[in-house]
Amino acid sequence: METNTELLSIIGLLADEDKFKILAAIALGAGTLAEIGEKTGFDHVKIVKAAARLEKAGLIERKADSGYRYLPQTLADLHVDLSKTIEHKPAASHLDRFIRNGRLTNFPKSQDDRLLVLEHLANLFEFDRRYTEKEVNIILNTLHPDHASFRRYLIDYGFLERNSETEDGRTTMLYWRKARS
């Protein structure tokens, strides 16, 4: 394919139901006007006109000895040309099913998916750093308002550890990132 006009022409031919049926009949092995007419129910005049357009587009060719033949390479080339001109969106990661625009939209039910989401949450915390409960809540709130549940999940699944420390008569709960085994 050299131009977008050619691409549009082929798409237009394939969108026309009668021309598509004629192309399909030829692709399925009908080579003569009689065979194409038998498969489609169309008269010879209609088949000849459509075949001329399909041949001009390079979708079929006519051989004097064997009749019409389908040329699949034309559609293969169309696919290649379209894939070069269409901007490809990167495939969504497994995590994208649960996090949109930086927010956790739902918590998965399957264990593997839960671990994936919790690992993502755990990566928000640095190793070798102690966090107060308030700091943990602030970080988790950036992804989901139910920070208490996700704090509990991170502990239950072994991503975070916690311990209380008392200083000057005040008890503070501290959390830290744990290396999972």
Image (cartoon, helix red, strand yellow):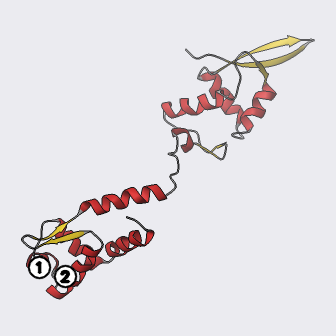
**In the figure, 50 relative to 140: above or below?**
below
Q: Position of residue 37 (x, y in %)?
A: 13, 80
Q: Quadrant of the C terminus?
A: top right
Q: Name the residue under label 2.
A: 47
The numbered disc on residue 33 is 1
Q: Which residue is drawn at 34% across and 74% down?
A: 15
Q: Residue at x 19, y 82 (%)?
A: 47
State which quadrant residue 62 falls in. Answer: bottom left
Q: Which residue is drawn at 72% across and 18% down?
A: 176
Element class at badge 1: helix
Instruction: Return the residue found at the far right.
Output: 168
- Closer-to-camera residue (116/52): 52
Q: In which quarter of the image is the N terminus?
A: bottom left
Q: Position of residue 178 (x, y in %)?
A: 65, 17
- Closer-to-camera residue (52/132): 52
**In the figure, 84 relative to 27: above or below?**
above
Tag 1 and tag 2, C-beta contact below 8 Å = yes
Mark 2 residue type? Ile
